[in-house]
Amino acid sequence: MSSDPKIDGFELKPGFRGMASDTGSDQTMFKGVHWGKAMMWIFLVSDTFVFSCFLIAYMKGRGSTPVEWPNPSEVFALDAFGVPVPLLLIALMTFVLITSSGTMALAVKYGYEKNRKMCGWLILATAIGGLTFVGMQVYEWSKLIHEGVRPWGNPFGAAQFGSFFFMITGFHGTHVSIGVIFLFIYAYKVFAGHYENGGKRGWFTTMKGDYVEIEILGLYWHFVDLVWVFIFAFFYLW
Amino acid sequence: MDNTDQISEKEKKGEGSTHKIGIYLWIWGLLFVLSFFSYMVDWYQFQGMLRWSLILFFMFAKAGLIMAFFMHLFWERYALVNVLLWPMTAIACFIFLMAAEFQYTLFTRMFYFFVGGAV
């Protein structure tokens, strides 16, 4: 691997040989990986299981009903200049989320280069992208609720449609909203210089801040985008 | 120059990695293109196996790019990468179990709702 870290006192080997020696040695297992990063990854794996359970439940619900499933292409169509365009809003939401994922990746890069201003502005741009996404989702929800979609039934087809829709997109939207809150907090922390000159101590800890926190925040944000990729494929396109 | 020296020194200390901006812009662009194609799957109303395989292909391509480059897994040590990816096989097993289950549920529903059970 191209950027295997070098740590004093360790002779780290790359690739699978490195994995065997990392796992078989004492002290830390994920050598050269910040503990916060490892913990965020473990949280994300558990969150992956939660989202998989929702999507698998949706697969089972949709597969086991003898009633026809509502056609997402028509249910989620949006009128643009009087013409119904299939999945228009969902496509826009996807592009907004990918855009915010890109700005987040760049924020992480500029953070590690200690470019405070660029990092801060890019995090702010990411937050605004996330906010736009949540706003569009609110619009989508209210539109469907006006059309009579409920967790227990809807005018388009199988009754299970609404419950899966509100559960899955609602849980994802909650993740986005929490991410937006943290993005604003970290934009403030970056602009305020909490990671400059060796770092200031954090709010709930005596440990010094470091730009690695931006990468950890980025991991969460990219995960939210990743989940949307699966929801887009299975719920909206399938 | 000075700047590159600093970066390589930082990498030696293991303080996190910086990569060239080009790779991020490339992945970003690819994600847009792949999303556009997956939207086109719906636009042109492909049906059946073609639709499902295209959806899955674009989905896994996008997920792979995000995880490998935006989430830096491509550059992480294998000890971390493997701990993250092996649990996903459990999800695959669960999908197979539940796929078998929904077919059985559908069969019994059809059988009792429409046929009226054993004759």
Image: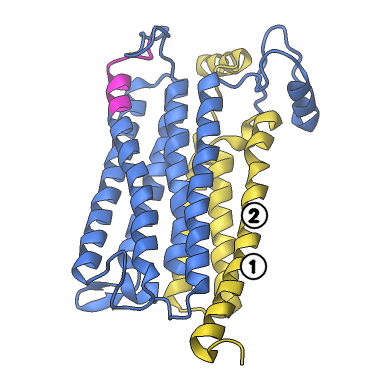
Chain colours: A blue, B yellow
Q: Which residue is mark 1?
A: B100
Q: Position of residue A234 (x, y in %)?
A: 48, 63
Which disc is residue B92 wearing?
Answer: 2
Q: Chain of mark 2?
A: B
Provide the residue span drawn in magenta.
Answer: A185-196
Q: Amino acid at mark 2?
A: Ala
Quadrant hosting residue B42? bottom left
Helix, strand or loop at mark 2: helix
Q: Nearer the viewer, residue B33 or B42?
A: B42
For image coordinates 61% across by 59% down, the residue present is: B95
- Distance (Cα) linking label 2 and label 1: 13 Å
Q: Is residue B24 visible?
A: yes
Instruction: Give the answer, above or below, for where A230 lies relative to A17.
Output: below
Helix, strand or loop at mark 1: helix
Quadrant hosting residue A177? top left
Left or right of A73? Residue A56 is: right
Q: Residues within 10 Å of mark 1 (few under 14, many from 20)?
A: few
Quadrant hosting residue B56? bottom right
Q: Nearer the viewer, residue B81 or B117?
A: B117
For image coordinates 33% across by 52% down, the residue present is: A170
Front tag of 2 and 1 = 1
Instruction: Give the answer, above or below, for where B53 lies relative to A112.
Output: below
For image coordinates 45% across by 70% down, the residue present is: B40
Q: Is residue B33 visible?
A: no
